[in-house]
Image (spheres, helix red, strand yellow):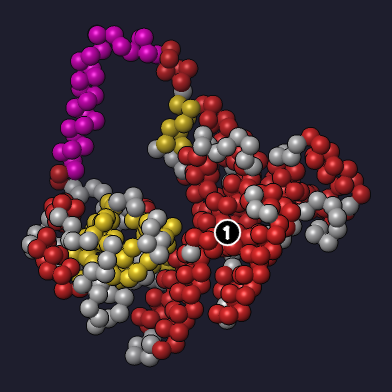
Amino acid sequence: MKTISAEQEKEIRLLYERYSSMVYRRCFSFLKSEDDAWDAVQDVFMKLTDSLNSIQKKESIYSWLLSVSTNYCISKLRKKKHVEFEEEIHSCGTDKKLPQEKNMVIQEVMQHFLNPWDKKIRDVVLYTYFDGYKQEEIAEMTGMGESTIRRHLTTFKRKCSQSGIQMEDLI
Amino acid sequence: MNRHSGPGKYTLERFFAGELDQKSSAEVKLHLETCSECASYVKSLDLEKAVYLNKHPYRDWAAVSNIETAEISLLERMKSWLFKPAFYPLYGLALVLCVVVPFIIQKDDPGIQYKGNRGLSFVYKRDGVLHDGATGKLFQQGDQIQLSYSFPDEHYAGLLSIDSKGTVSTYQPVSGGQNLTTYVKECDNCPVSQSIILDGTPGGELIILLIARKELLLDDIRSWAAQVSNNDVNLSDVEKRVRRGLPRDVIECRTLLLQKR
Ligand SMILES: [Zn+2]
């Protein structure tokens, strides 16, 4: 049980009512499940409750929510992919060649997301292709310059074509 | 919406949330009067919000998230009344009920079916269905446990488990190899590369994730685990010994004690 003050409760309620439907909509697009999207909203707003004091006043709450929900959904998708893969290994008996190849692709995708400098690229890629935001908007929300955003997109496209990763593997 | 020179999706969403300053908000408003595409997007956000809040109102979120509001004003009012010496014997009794009784109950009944370090979370798959591991359940044979954790720097991660019979199981990245560990650059809530399928041995299963600065040799870790286990059926004690005497080169260890049917 987490106890919050009446004042905090009022603020959280206001933020929940203002933003939760948009967070839900976005998480649903990622996770393709109503239950998972509702779990995501629970988690994201719990984090918001915990971080309310540390979020800078001038920072957009919405951009903060987008960033936290991205992390949640990617991590959820990663877990799902991993369990699905493990399941395949255990059910396929002696022929383990195919899952291992699949594992290599998944590992590569996961590795791609694990590099610290790639987190910025990931956000730029998702905001561009997944959310359909303009480059000037992404610049505003992330604080990156538009030329940096374009460079990240180019790097991402190059990396994808080099390793043969399709967009569907990532989102 | 991105085809025209007006506001983009993100700006419309911020407008809808009331985040824009007065000037930008007025510009968007003006644009909405002439652009049916943007107007219908904002309208769809409004509609979705109504449907969503009807299905998941704030009180539902607060209930599932265990949020409780402190009645500060009421507390303040009651303070002076509650701290009267006449009530002290009652408080003594309450203390006995709250602290001693649960302690006695816990001795007879394991009560909590799982416990773990905050730094090690997990999901488990049973009969093809994925469940969140944070719900405190009794586990059973065949449950597939997938752990995840965060660690900010590069490291080597090794996974092993000890059951109530003292059997040590290790989960290597390459079966038949010499090492127990996998190199990880850094990780933010990422899955451990091996998952664990529980066997039918009744009792507990102590799962241990070792985070090391170097590769850990399988043989070294197996003999360390056999030593800390010492065939002790009380896995809580084993867990304490694990934490007290980590193997060489191990920076940190995360544990999870599961109870099986
Ligand atoms: Zn428009």
Residue at the (60%, 51%) spot, across then down: A66
Task: Say which quadrant the C terminus of chain A sits in.
Answer: bottom right
Residue at 67% x, 60% y: name it.
A149
Q: Which amino acid does the dot numbered 1 rest on?
A: Lys
**On what subunit does the disc labeled 1 rest?**
A
Residue that mark 1 sits on: A120
Q: Is residue A153 magenta?
A: no
Q: Give the main secondary structure of the magenta stretch.
A: helix
- Disc 1 on helix, strand or loop? helix
Residue B171, compared with residue B67, is above or below; it is below
> In the rendered view of the protein, which quadrant contains the N terminus of chain A?
top left
Q: Position of residue B110 (x, y in %)?
A: 20, 49
Residue lying furthest bottom in this view?
A95
Up/down of B149 relative to B216, above or below: above
Task: Work out whether residue B10 or residue A8 is closer to the camera in this orientation and state it.
Answer: B10
Quick check: A64 above or below A165?
Answer: above
Residue B76 location (% of width, % of height)? 43, 14
Residue plotted at (17% across, 61% down) = B247
Q: Which residues are magenta?
A: B78-106
Mark yes or no: residue B13 visible.
yes
- Residue A7 sits in which quadrant? top right
Q: Residue furthest right?
A: B34
